[in-house]
Amino acid sequence: MKKAFIFIFPLFLLCLVSFSSVAQKDIFIKEFQFELKKLSANQYENEYFLTITLNKNSLYKFTVLNHIGDFPGKAVVEILDNDKTVALNYVNGKYYSKFMFKCTKTGFYDILIHFQDNKLGSSLIKLYLVQ
């Protein structure tokens, strides 16, 4: 019994250390709230636009909480680098309320948010740095 304990206990510690070093840590950076209570004929007024700085080789996680205040819309979050889409949470008809973005260069990125199918909505988008 004692020999088994001496063998198993170090294995247990090794597994515990391995899992704790693999565990991700999310560091909250910023949140964006976008609410659209009335549609406009001007499409630009139905979108939320902001610019943020992201760092090369960093992994970012975006989470989207929809239907705040019982609005039907789902926020579509698009990350743009010089007018080129580099990440999106609505792809091939599938919607993702959480998505990751691996930044390939340090610089300014535009975040464009609108509601799917031109619906009214209220959403909270949170940005995290994953370490």
Image (spheres, rainbow, N blue to C red):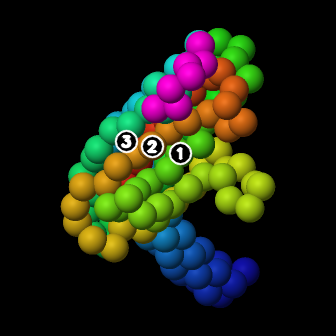
Q: In the image, which is nearer the foreground, mark 3 or mark 2? A: 2
Count neighbours of disc 3 (C-alpha within 10 A) and say few if under 14, some if 14 to 19, many if 20 or more.
Answer: few
Which residue position holds label 3? Answer: 28
The residue type indicated by label 3 comes to Phe
Cα gap from disc 3 to disc 1, whole angstroms: 18 Å
Q: Work out whether mark 3 precedes mark 1 in sequence or the reverse, and give the earlier one.
A: 3
**Are dots 2 and 1 in contact, CB under 8 Å?**
yes
Please provide percent x and percent y for residue 126: 46, 38
Residue 71 lies in what quarter of the image? top right
Residue at 55 percent of width and 19 percent of height = 40
Residue at 74 percent of width and 61 percent of height = 92
**Are dots 3 and 2 in contact, CB under 8 Å?**
no
Q: Work out whether mark 3 precedes mark 2 in sequence or the reverse, and give the earlier one.
A: 3
Which residue position holds label 2? Answer: 112
- Whether residue 56 can be seen here: yes
Q: In the image, which is nearer the foreground, mark 3 or mark 1? A: 1
Cα gap from disc 3 to disc 2, whole angstroms: 20 Å
Count neighbours of disc 2 (C-alpha within 10 A) and say few if under 14, some if 14 to 19, many if 20 or more.
Answer: some
Q: Is residue 13 above or below residue 101?
A: below
Cα gap from disc 2 to disc 1, whole angstroms: 6 Å
Please provide percent x and percent y for residue 85: 47, 61
Please provide percent x and percent y for residue 118: 67, 31
Q: Work out whether mark 2 precedes mark 1 in sequence or the reverse, and give the earlier one.
A: 1
Helix, strand or loop: magenta stretch: loop
Report how many numbered discs are placed on residues in the image: 3
Give the farthest residue toward the right.
Answer: 93
**Are dots 3 and 1 in contact, CB under 8 Å?**
no
Element assignment for label 2: strand
The magenta stretch spans which residues? 38-44
Residue 72 lies in what quarter of the image? top right
Please provide percent x and percent y for residue 120: 65, 21
Q: In this view, does 89 lie above or below 43?
A: below
